[in-house]
Image (cartoon, coloured by chain):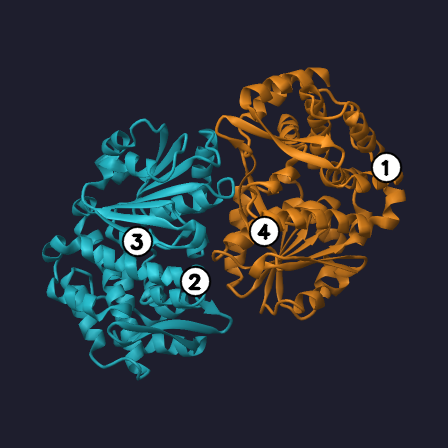
Chain colours: A orange, B cyan
Amino acid sequence: MKRLHIGLADRGYDILIGSGLLDSLGRLIADVRTPSKAVVLTDDHIWSLYGDRLTAALGDLPHRVLVLPHGEQTKCAEVYAQALSFCAQNQLTRTDMLIAFGGGVIGDLGGFVAATYMRGIDFVQVPTTLLAQVDSSVGGKTAIDLPEGKNLVGAFWQPVLVVADLDLLQTLPSREQAGGMAEVIKYGAIFDSALFAKLEAHPTWETLTPILDEIVYACCDWKRQVVERDERDTGDRMLLNFGHTFGHAIEAHGRYTDYIHGEGVALGMVLAAKAGIRLGVTPVGTDDRLESLCDSFGLPMTDRFPAAALTAHLALDKKRAGSALRLVLLRAIGEGYVHSLPVDEVLSLAEDIGDAN
Amino acid sequence: MKRLHIGLADRGYDILIGSGLLDSLGRLIADVRTPSKAVVLTDDHIWSLYGDRLTAALGDLPHRVLVLPHGEQTKCAEVYAQALSFCAQNQLTRTDMLIAFGGGVIGDLGGFVAATYMRGIDFVQVPTTLLAQVDSSVGGKTAIDLPEGKNLVGAFWQPVLVVADLDLLQTLPSREQAGGMAEVIKYGAIFDSALFAKLEAHPTWETLTPILDEIVYACCDWKRQVVERDERDTGDRMLLNFGHTFGHAIEAHGRYTDYIHGEGVALGMVLAAKAGIRLGVTPVGTDDRLESLCDSFGLPMTDRFPAAALTAHLALDKKRAGSALRLVLLRAIGEGYVHSLPVDEVLSLAEDIGDAN
């Protein structure tokens, strides 16, 4: 088991990474907190696979389980209110705990419930997808969606513990595995050319599995460094949005059903590389290298986006500050940076690469 | 105009207290922030009285107004989601602003919207009730209700400016004026025997009006001291809950329609004094002195509460920590303190004073 400490003054916590950790969950929680009871938020897929093991692992910690439908639709205001009422009905108090047992949707929703129920209670993340293990469970960003857009509502709220059991990743649908790889590739692209090269040397899920612990650890460690420097997402942390500005537009274009998040990010990274090349800041061929690595992990790279579909969704973007958009671009593989552009220029850039793609 | 600075490291802000400040709102905001647009949250009562003046006061700051029904029912998850969508539909960005223009309901709801929309945007409070001016607009507690209980959901989020125009208080229904006085009396009871004595010397709204600026300032200044010491409500800040444990139970008993918040607090303070007397910690007669002052400001003091009604609502209380409840009691007028009691003892105490009242 690898242990990574996220140092955020009094709100620091550990991320535990390893095989078979799920069965020790109760003991791992007891090492950091002693709640009198817990509410578990999970989804129907995860619960049917691992519900019995989780219940056994929690031992004598009294807990009630709210099993939600899987999928992004669960991350909405209505289910949020339902989960809050579930906590209240089970008389969860400020010294009790919420356990988010699932992928990014459950983690984001559960984190936001924990952040706001009684103005904040402890929560433990047990991320069950690669995406959640390397990205959404590190850094304290919690969120729900609005009909008007993804992740438009949320809070910064740190878990007291993250338990990332790598074994759970082996039962993921291959599409989810690939989706998570998009974020792994992202870390290589913006921070770590050695990680990127290592992925190119292990370019399939099967060849990567034996070194998955070090890969997940490396990603979490990069995110740790960024989060420690910039907890509230005003500067450096923005680098993590590489691929996300275009990616969110692509997800929205697909009505959040055609593409999973990682697929949007993968396509968004390639588009961001193309944008950087057009602007003369990214080396020619970077887009091909990204595209090839994404493709080798099974991320779909062949779709075409009408420029209008991209631009329509770029206007309402959290990263928009006044009349400028901050895009994350690459100076090289391993070197991302924030590039501010007037919204109009981003839109015309999107039209270019939208057509070009 | 009096100016009180709330010093919370990088999240400090000013409370401005005076007559006629509403008409200068745009200029006062421009002194601290330069948003490109704003969303105003308000209620139908306030908007019919002051909407034209607010719009004029905002001058050339583009703003859209969401007018919500007045009353506690508005502080729910559905209206919260509606307000968030309103912000998104008007493309409010992270550098824009929300203005909460109303009483405690609008302030709590608007603050929670601002705390969570895009994980937090600037907001300005323009409290229009005495209760909001002396209590809910100081300290950064934001909240909505659940069907299961009041204020069960929220976040700590500080405004960037509070503008308390005392003139607005003169159009309040007398019941609202009295409700606010309950919180004013509370500050005297727990912190400030001189303030309490001053209220006893000006025991009606009419006699108090000429010195309202110093009264509101004194209350905000007490709350400031507590909030600066204990922003996240883990210790000292709990003193501000004097009267609230029983008060919330009384409000719930009245289904949040029979009693306004201040009426619940007033009755709760008298009950807490009676509880302290029973426990031998509060001087005999303190309950009568509180009751007399509340009564002189028109707070209803004659209702009877079945003990069962009190106890039924005490079990789910935010201040409950595990199996103990922390009650705020008085050692004397001007000297509140936190008294931990097993839940069972609180319930039997509630039965005693419920019968006795």
* Mark 1–mark 3 distance (CA, rounded to whole Å): 65 Å
Residue A327 higher or lower than A126, as above or below: above
Q: Which residue type carries mark 1?
A: Glu
Looking at the rendered structure, the kind of residue marked 3 is Thr
Amino acid type, callout 4 = Gly
| Image height of B27 relative to B230, above or below | above
Q: Nearer the viewer, mark 2 or mark 1?
A: 1
Which residue, given by chain and number where applicable, does mark 2 sit on? Answer: B233
- N-term-proximal mark, 3 vs 2: 2
Query: Label 2's element?
Result: loop
Q: Nearer the viewer, residue B303 or A262?
A: A262
Whether residue A148 is visible to the viewer of this picture, yes or no, is no
Q: Which residue is mark 3?
A: B257
Name the element at disc 4.
helix
Co-location on one chain, circles 4 and 3:
no
Q: Report which residue position mark 4 lands on.
A: A111
Name the image quarter holding residue A5: bottom right
Picture residue at 54% right of the left edge, 61% below the top: A90
Q: Are marks 2 and 1 on the same chain?
A: no
Circle 1: element type:
helix
Q: Nearer the viewer, mark 4 or mark 3?
A: 4
Few, some or many C-alpha atoms within 10 Å of disc 3 (few <14, some 14-19, many ≥20)? Answer: few
Mark 3 to mark 2 CA distance (whole Å): 28 Å
Q: Residue at x 77, y 60 (%)?
A: A21
- 1 or 4: tag closer to the N-terminus: 4
Q: Give the residue number, with chain letter if any, for mark 1.
A: A200
**Closest to the observer, B40 or A8:** A8
Q: Which image quadrant for residue B224? A: bottom left
- Of badges 3 and 2, the one in the foreground is 2
